[in-house]
Amino acid sequence: MLEQLAALGPFFTVQEHTADSAPIPPWHSMSELAEDPDVLHDRVTETQAYLAAAGGQSPDAIEARVAASVTHLGLVARLISPALALAVLGAAVPSLALEDLRWQPVLGGAFPLSLPWGPSIGSKGPQDLSIGLFEGPIPVIGEATRPFAVSEHILWGNVASAVNGAATAITNAAPHLAERTAHLAALLLAAPALRDTHTTFAETGRFRRRSCCLIYRAAPDHAGPLCGDCALNQH
């Protein structure tokens, strides 16, 4: 199963650890994102510097809320992607509680992620997946991000975008999974927390979020390109 996930792309690639085991360096518990404000602050600051360097600017030129939104989107996308893929592949999804997850907080791309496996852990149905995500780590990470002045509308828009992005990536990598992927993604996007965050156009199937992740503001003069699913993108 780990090989099947890895074949879908880096955001789906995971390692595994025994449930209830203590994290062994360089692994950390993801619960530190919520329990230690310095951990998320450091990651936002690192993202701020990364975005600034990409645009040839000083870190002070990047608004903290922009870096925080980009950080949040990366975190939720990294959790949602393998969870959705496991459900699509018909496998049990392990516990997604932050205290059960392990990560290596490196910057750039998909950070290393490890999921817990054990005989008492696992969910099989789409309802379990929705509950596991939207009553589990996703709102916790969102709440931890709110001190950076990112609106709840943007944060939940990031989540919807992450669901759609994961579904698109699975379909592109494995077209034979397209139908089941679309079905499960639609169920997630219909969850109460996400219902008002996006529009899916019936005639084309195109997804558009009703907010912006703000990354365009990281470019000089706030004139960066818009994401394909952005509410500001009228094309």
Image (tube, helix red, strand yellow):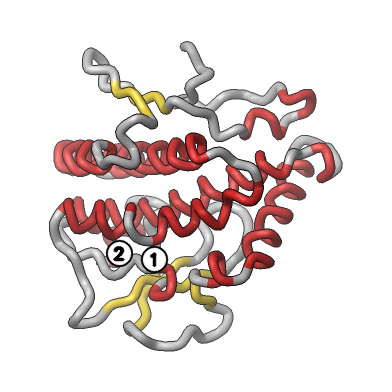
Against 134, is 191 above or below? Answer: above
Q: What residue type is labelled 1?
A: Val
Q: Residue 14 carries which label?
A: 1
Report if residue 10 is visible in the image: no
Residue 164 left/right relative to 112: left
**Disc 1 secondary structure class:** loop
Q: Are marks 1 and 2 in contact (CB under 8 Å)?
A: no
Which sits in the foreground, 73 or 150? Answer: 150
Nearer mark to the viewer, of 1 and 2: 1
Between discs 1 and 2, the one toward the N terminus: 2
Which residue does the image show at 54% across and 65% down from the upper left?
34
Against 76, is 94 above or below? Answer: below
Residue 37 percent coordinates (x, y):
64, 65
> For the residue carrying disc 1, how many other residues have a C-alpha within 10 Å: few (<14), some (14-19), or many (20+)?
many
Q: What residue type is labelled 2?
A: Glu
Residue 103 percent coordinates (x, y):
50, 70
